[in-house]
Amino acid sequence: MTTTPTTTTTAATPDVRARLLGHLARLVACDTRNPPRAGQGIDALFAIVREALPTTFLIEERDLGDGCRWLRAVRGHPEGRVAPLVNVHIDTVPRDDGWQGDPFTLQLLVDNGVEKAIGLGACDIKGAVAAFLVAAVDTEGTGAPAELVLTSDEEAGSSRCVRTFVEEHPVSGRLVLVAEPTSARAVVAHRGIGTATVTFNGIGGHASQHRAIEDSAVAEAVRFCARALDVANATDNTIRLNLGRIEGGTKANMIAFSYP
């Protein structure tokens, strides 16, 4: 079953709602899938942010290469105030083959009485960018300091932007708000990902032999995955485990093995 990333709209005035969804529609239309494959999409999204933010924000961009780019927008002097540093990653995963419709066109649907805005990256996490753009305008007259850092390489798996940013702009002692899908709740949780590719070895032969149960590399991979799932299930949902891809073996009547 294919699941579709969504962001749920909460109660807001008609004006705020319209502006929020207007920003979100434009942001979703930017193809920012796993840079550097979609560099022009990052250009378009950064241009939208520059256009939407009040002119009191000072904006800088950095290109670290290989699709790793950030945009920093600062109003006032947030380092010396309570205002948090808000970090949002703007890259998305690719479109799933089971997606219905155009993933770059925002759709508004009602699910069990709840209105949802659906589009690639709407929930993870362009909705947060749209919310910041609205808040930045609505607080413009208060003199409140604010700082936003958009990064483009979380889903690509490098996180070079964040590492380089904190080296150049130390955040020790600051309040940092990292936008992630948390059902509109402030939580203390992990950010980031660890990935691995594992090779399993077996002893090849004809599958008519009973030893296939123990000697098949595919069977060993399945046993390992089952143990990993048991560990993840036993940790009260503190571990997010995803088995992304399993491949190997030759055919149904051959015990799977791997070359040394």
Image: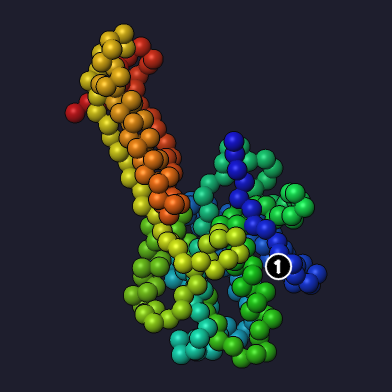
Q: Dot 1: within a 10 Å radius of its alpha carbon, few (fewer than 14), some, or many (20 or more) residues?
A: many
**Residue appearing at x 67%, y 58% in the figure:** 8
Residue 15, quarter of picture: bottom right
Colour style of the rendered protein structure: rainbow
Q: Is residue 157 visible?
A: no
Count the numbered circles shown: 1
Q: Where, quadrant-wise, is the N terminus in this rendering?
A: top right
Residue under label 1, please give it: 20
SS state under label 1:
helix
Instruction: Tell which residue pokes out farthest to the left in this image.
Output: 260
Residue 194 x, y percent position in the rendering: 36, 52
Residue 113 x, y percent position in the rendering: 77, 52
Residue 205 relative to residue 242: left or right? left
Q: Residue at x 61, y 73 (%)?
A: 132
When asked about the image quadrant of residue 131, the answer is bottom right
195 or 225, which lies in front? 225
For the question of whether residue 98 can be seen, the reply is yes
Closer to us: 68 or 215: 215
Between 237 and 73, the one nearer to me in the picture? 237
The C terminus sits in image quarter: top left
Q: Residue furthest right?
A: 14
Dot 1 amino acid type: Leu
Q: Position of residue 122 (x, y in %)?
A: 62, 57
Instruction: Tell me which residue sits at (61%, 91%) in the image.
Output: 143
